Image (spheres, rainbow, N blue to C red):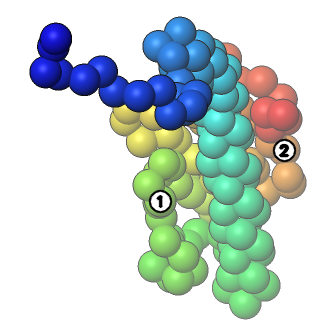
Amino acid sequence: MNSQQSPEYTGPVSGYTLIELCVVIALIGIISAIAVPAYSGYSITARQAAAMSRINQIALALERYNQTHYSYEADFDTLEIPDGDQWFEYSIRNADRFSFIIRAEPIAGNNMLVELNMDHIGRRQHRKAGHRQWSHGWPR
């Protein structure tokens, strides 16, 4: 007789099979492959919307400055507004007594973002990184 006794059966064993675990891992991979590009697109849209809002703030500050100084020739220190953020660098171009252009340029490495312009009468333009021609309006 064998001195070793076989373990007694105590009921069903709980746990997952290897195939079930592989299916779950594959589903997680598929879902993440769909979700990551969608999230990336939303974050780019949000960054551009923040830049559009900042341009409007700068334009309002220039209009307030013009009311007291009769000129748009101001810099960011005079307006007490930061000239950039982590995604865009802002500039006031061609400012004189009657007009201005505000530009938001993506900081190097953010080539998915677009350049934005707004002038003294509210005309808005944008262009993609690397393109030369401006399009009317702001991106949607």
The residues tagged by marks 1 and 2 sit, at their Cα atoms, a distance apart of 23 Å
Q: Residue at x 44, y 55 (%)?
A: 86
Residue at the disc numbered 1? 85
User: Observer-nearest residue: 102 or 36?
Assistant: 36
User: Observer-nearest residue: 35 or 26?
Assistant: 26
Q: In terms of sequence position, does the residue under pointer 1 or pointer 2 come before the other?
A: 1
Q: Quadrant of the N terminus?
A: top left
Q: Please state which amino acid type lies under the numbered disc 1.
A: Asp
The nearer-to-camera label among 1 and 2 is 1
Give residue 131's position: percent from left, percent from top: 58, 15
Give the answer, above or below, for where 110 lies relative to 87.
Answer: above
Residue at the disc numbered 2? 123
Q: Residue at x 34, y 27 (%)?
A: 7
Tell how many labels.
2
Q: Residues within 10 Å of mark 1 (few under 14, many from 20)?
A: few
Please tell me whether mark 2 sits on a helix, a strand or a loop.
loop
Give the answer, above or below, for where 42 lies relative to 52.
Answer: above
Give residue 95's position: percent from left, percent from top: 61, 59
Q: Residue at x 25, y 23 (%)?
A: 5
Report if residue 136 is visible in the image. Answer: yes
Q: Is residue 1 left or right of residue 52?
A: left
Give the answer, above or below, for where 118 lies relative to 60.
Answer: above
